[in-house]
C-alpha cells in the first residue's frame, strides 16, 4: 500500500489541565512553530474530542524530526510544561517518544 507520509497519534489530556493545554495550542510560542518547521514537520493539525486529542502531520524523515526536536531548547521548555498535562508522558530523547498510529487507508 502506498502511504501518505502523514503520522498520527492520540493523547489523553488530564481534565484539570485541559483549558491550559488548549490555550497553549491556540497561542503557540513562535519558536515552537519555527522548530517544528526546521524539523521538517508540515501540515500539522490537532483535533480535540473532549480530553482526547488527535495529532497528524506530514514529515519525510520522522527520526530526523524527532532528533531535532529533542535537541531544541524551546521544545524542551514547552515539553516540560505540556508533558505534565498528558496522561502518561513523552520525551523526544526516548527511542520512540510518540508511537504513531498505523495508516491502513490512503486516498491520494
Image: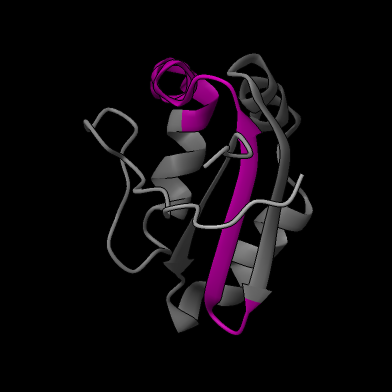
Magenta residues span 49-75
| Nearer to me, 11 or 28 | 11
Q: Is residue 58 magenta?
A: yes
Q: Is residue 23 magenta?
A: no
Q: Residue furthest left?
A: 95
- Residue 83, relative to residue 69: is it above or below? below
Q: How is the image coloured?
A: one colour
Q: Residue furthest front?
A: 1
Q: How many marks?
A: 0
Q: Position of residue 87 (x, y in %)?
A: 33, 69
* Residue in the image at 42% along x and 55% along y: 101
* Residue in the image at 58% along x and 57% along y: 105
Q: Position of residue 48 (x, y in %)?
A: 65, 73
- Residue 6, relative to residue 20: is it above or below? above
Q: Position of residue 15 (x, y in %)?
A: 47, 83
The quadrant in which the C terminus is found is top right
Q: Position of residue 4 (x, y in %)?
A: 63, 39
| Nearer to me, 61 or 45 | 61
* Residue in the image at 36% along x and 45% along y: 98
- Residue 97, relative to residue 59: is it above or below? below
Left or right relative to 17: residue 20: right
| Nearer to me, 5 or 108 | 108
- Residue 8, relative to residue 35: is it above or below? below
Amino acid at each position: 500500500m502506498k502511504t501518505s507520509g502523514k503520522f498520527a497519534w492520540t493523547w489523553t489530556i488530564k481534565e484539570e489541565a485541559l483549558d491550559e493545554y488548549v490555550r497553549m495550542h491556540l497561542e503557540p510560542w513562535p519558536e515552537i512553530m519555527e522548530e517544528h518547521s526546521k524539523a521538517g514537520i508540515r501540515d500539522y493539525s490537532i483535533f480535540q474530542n473532549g480530553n482526547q486529542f488527535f495529532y497528524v502531520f506530514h514529515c519525510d524523515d520522522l527520526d530526523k524530526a524527532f532528533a531535532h526536536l529533542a535537541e531544541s531548547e524551546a521544545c524542551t521548555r514547552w515539553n516540560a510544561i505540556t508533558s505534565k498535562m498528558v496522561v502518561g508522558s513523552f520525551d523526544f530523547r526516548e527511542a520512540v517518544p510518540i508511537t504513531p498510529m498505523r495508516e491502513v487507508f490512503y486516498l491520494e
